Amino acid sequence: MSGSTTERGLGWRHQQDVESLRRRHVEGTACWWCERPMFKDPARNFDGKTLEGDHSEARSRGGRKADRLMHSTCNRQRGDGSKDELRPAVTGVWPPPAGAPAVAMVELTGPPEPRAHVLYWG
Ligand SMILES: [Zn+2]
């Protein structure tokens, strides 16, 4: 066992952290990124996906431990943490419902705003 898979921060240790977070998760807890409720059952989440572990201190900034859960879509939007101030919880620009094409977002959120195009809603 070389341990090489853990060096990127997303190996076994990350999985253990995420499993621990999932075990302690209180159903309906608001997502830090979008403020929508989070559920263990993927079907109940707005994006229909399993919750993922997120580093409140972005990995690109030295964060080593997943310390909270986040929607899969939100986790991907957050990326390296450089757009934290653009998260829906701050801007009020919300993700489209699960299954809706990303291009429908502009109609759902009203007049196009530059920030609406910064985030990836896939
Ligand atoms: Zn979210």
Image (cartoon, rainbow, N blue to C red):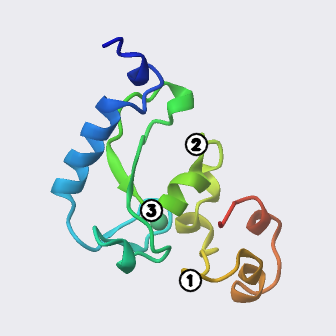
Task: In the displayed orientation, state which residue is furthest to the top.
Answer: 2
For image coordinates 57% across by 53% down, the residue present is 76
Q: Where on the picture, by quarter, is residue 57?
A: top left
| Closest to the observer, 4 or 76 | 4
Mark 3 against mark 2, which lies toward the viewer? 3
- Callout 2: SS: loop
Task: In the displayed orientation, state which residue is furthest to the left.
Answer: 24
Say few, some or many: other residues with alpha carbon within 10 Å of mark 2 (under 14 / 14 to 19 / 20 or more): some
- Amino acid type shown at disc 1: Pro
| Closest to the observer, 63 or 5 | 5
For image coordinates 76% across by 58% down, the residue present is 118
Q: Relative to 86, does residue 108 appear above or below in the rendering?
A: below
- Amino acid type shown at disc 2: Gly
| Closest to the observer, 17 or 110 | 17
- Callout 3: SS: loop
Marks 1 and 3 close (CB-CB < 8 Å): no
Residue 87 as seen in the image, left or right of residue 48: right
Q: Which mark is residue 83?
A: none
- Amino acid type shown at disc 3: His
Marks 3 and 2 close (CB-CB < 8 Å): no
State the CA–CA distance, disc 3 to disc 2. 15 Å
Residue that carries the numbered disc 1 in the rendered image: 97
In the rendered image, which quarter contains the N terminus? top left
Residue that carries the numbered disc 3 in the rendered image: 71
Q: Relative to 3, does residue 101 appear above or below in the rendering?
A: below
Q: x and y percent of residue 15 in the render?
A: 31, 39
Which numbered disc flags the more N-terminal residue, 1 or 3?
Answer: 3
Mark 3 sits near ligand 1, with its Cβ under 8 Å away? yes
Say few, some or many: other residues with alpha carbon within 10 Å of mark 3 (under 14 / 14 to 19 / 20 or more): many
State the CA–CA distance, disc 1 to disc 2. 23 Å
Q: x and y percent of residue 98 in the render?
A: 54, 80
Residue that carries the numbered disc 2 in the rendered image: 81
